Amino acid sequence: MERYNHFLLLFLALVIGTVSCEKKEDVPPQVELKVTSYYPNSGKAGTLVTIEGEGFGTSIGDYQATIGGKSAEVISATATALVLRMPVGAASGNLDVKYRDKVLPIGTYTYQDLSVVRVFPTNGPAGSQIRIGGAGFGSVESPAAVYINNKKALVVSLTDTLIVAEVPNEAGTGAVMVKVDGKEAKGQNFIYQAIHSIKPLTGGKGTNVVITGEGFEALATNNKVEFNGQMATIVEATPERLVVRAPEGVTTGALSVSINEQKTTGPTFTVVDKPVIQTVTPLSGPKGTEMVITGSLFSKLLDENSVYINNVLVPLAEATENQLKLIVPGGTGSGAIRVVVNDQASTGPLFKDQTLGISSVSPDNGLTGTAVTIKGTGFSAVALENKVYFNGVLAAVKTATETSLVLDAPAGLTTGDIKIVVGGQEAVSPKPFRRAGIMTLIGGPSSNALSNNLGSIAVDQQGNVYVTDAAEKVVKKITPSGDLSILKVNGQDATFGMPSGIVIDKQNNIYIGDQTANQIIKITAGGQRSVYASGFSPGKLTIDNAGVLYVNVAGFSAGMNRVNNTGNYSKINGPSWVSARPAVDASGAIYWADQNSNSGNGVARRDVSGTQNINWVGYSEGGYQDGIGSNAYFNGINGIVIYQGTKMYVADTYNSAVREVDMATRRVTTIFKGAGFGFVDGSLQVAKFAAISDIAVDNEGNIYLLDPNNKAIRKLFF
């Protein structure tokens, strides 16, 4: 029984000890007693002095206070503040507080009329105003001066008991001081608020933004952050740094921080969409391969971009707004490419973690027979062991190394990916190989199919191309397969004095301008010929959806005529000296290149109301530059056509270029620019022209270009 009692007592002791330990762990740690500030530091008897800090006891009886050795009454005690009443009959001196057995030196207190009793607000940015309440501010000698953290503030207004002052720039945090007639009084500490920077400056919903500055609250809920008026979520908070998350519905505008209703405005946060991934090169490869990601809305600041391969973060080597570069680390496994810019994420194509990969294809466009070089890794040095497919069509490799393949684009080529198969692995090109380039439909410098005095071209509904040949006084027809014939009337060659402009309507009726005869000839789809209009010398022409012709009048400043469906014509106000093919859109607006008003280097526009814009796109000065409206430059326009009502194609003669105009935005971009003067077919990078004197487009969007100096009609694929 004694043994049992012994064990029972031991067990109870262990339980009690355990409980005691658990209770001790639940007790919050003791906060060390510390004084941070006091105010005011001067005043009359009866003035209340507040001492701020932490770790104070809340029992008034535990405190004793003295000023110059004389007792002062403690009238309030909390864990963070004591309030004392300055006694009658005491002298200026040291203010001390004894808490139990610990003496706390507070500072000096001066008995005088000047006293700073209250400062409101006690925080704010530069330029904000504070109200200082107290006594003794008035003076007949010199006005009171206010200092915040020893930096002088502008006094806005002053009475004996109230001063309004403006917070100076870079005031910092410290006491508010008033100086009058050689006396000074210190009040509460003022906390200066400022936003020094935000990072990033761009992003969208969910972007985490780091705000650096001063005067923030360490307790997150005491800070209010807004993005252009939209409340943000605060993730972290310190007095010098806030991390916030951009809210739903965020819009471009200033970011602001408000504390105790005091608002500080910072830089503008610009809302941008998530990044756009256009190409990833290569889409497969081994460790050590350089990967290039092109696109838009990347950040030029390296640390604002993150790239993941198969959810593995990969360090970046370089970053611009349109390109990211990194080295493939290997071991990521195969998976999607993901780009994150300022917490905005976009997922791109799959990457294969393997030996075989395609880094570049040059050129990236061409036609059958175009010589193509493919660079990459993991190829076989034996040509036959590399299977290369252009959108499913097998091509024969001519030469091969482990990093390079040379071959010709195969017959039957269509736009699509290039795929390489080597030893059971497959690799895909970073972007599709385009069936694009220049092909001569008919003619050439050494051909006699066409003369070198060609006027204009047109395409019918079946894709047949017609060209006026002034030297031979006929119109020649070229089928899509390249067969050549002369346009006939009643079984005979149709001849003209000087055939110039040509256009074909939706019923395949052909209209030809005969300059020396001062006539426009109509030839029906059935081969019947008639004089459609006469009385002026017609140059190049176009037709609108209603069958109305718009015809340049040959000669200096001869203008342009409108020819209606009955063959009657009238002068159009606006166009002056026009030799290039004009165009008309569905609304009836006319477009032309005027050699008088813009030297033929710009496209002018006149709407149905008569309103004109001479430099709708382009400018009177010749040059070469893509851009919007008159910020774009051409060098000698020789033809304008409109495709599907939204795109305009312009023959830019002396730049040997074809330019596209977005008709809604007036943005000019280059489809093709010749590699130089000459006669070369092939990819868009190598093709050459002697000149481009006219342009036409078929129903499928293929563009035909007249190259008279090479006696050729060329076809543009893009």
Image (spheres, rainbow, N blue to C red):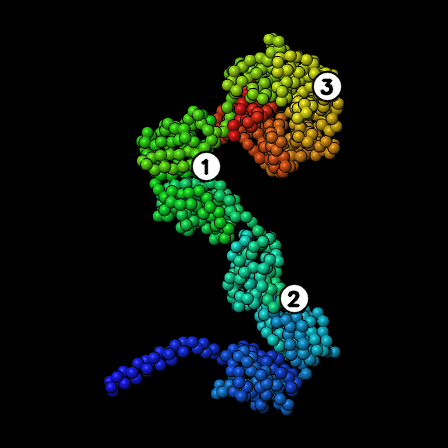
Which quadrant holds residue 487? top right
- Where does the image place residue 554, in percent across and percent down from the top left? 69, 20
Q: Tag 1's secondary structure?
A: loop
Instruction: Count residues near mark 3 (Cα–Cα under 10 Å), then give few for <14, some for 14-19, many for 20+.
Output: few
* Farthest-out residue, front: 1
Q: In the rendered image of this protein, does residue 594 appear above or below residue 429? A: above
Percent position of residue 164, x then y? 69, 71
Residue 1 in the image: state x and y as whole percent.
Answer: 24, 86
- 570 vs 181, nearest the viewer: 570
Q: What residue type is labelled 1?
A: Lys
Q: Which residue type does callout 2 highlight?
A: Ser
Which of the 4 image quadrants contains residue 503?
top right
User: Depth check: 2 or 548 in front?
Assistant: 2
Real-space Cα separation, disc 2 to disc 3, in angstroms: 78 Å
The residue at 64%/84% (across/down) is: 47
Q: Distance between the residues labelled 1 and 3?
A: 53 Å
Badge 3 amino acid:
Thr
Instruction: Point out the frontmost of discs 1 and 3.
Output: 3
Picture coordinates of residue 672, whole percent (x, y): 54, 30
Distance in Å between CA atoms under marks 2 and 1: 57 Å
- Name which quarter of the figure residue 169 lies in: bottom right
Q: Which mark is drawn over residue 431?
A: 1
- Residue under pointer 3: 566
Q: For mark 2, does the 10 Å Cα neighbourhood hold few (<14), some (14 to 19), or many (20 or more) residues?
A: some
The residue that disc 2 covers is: 128
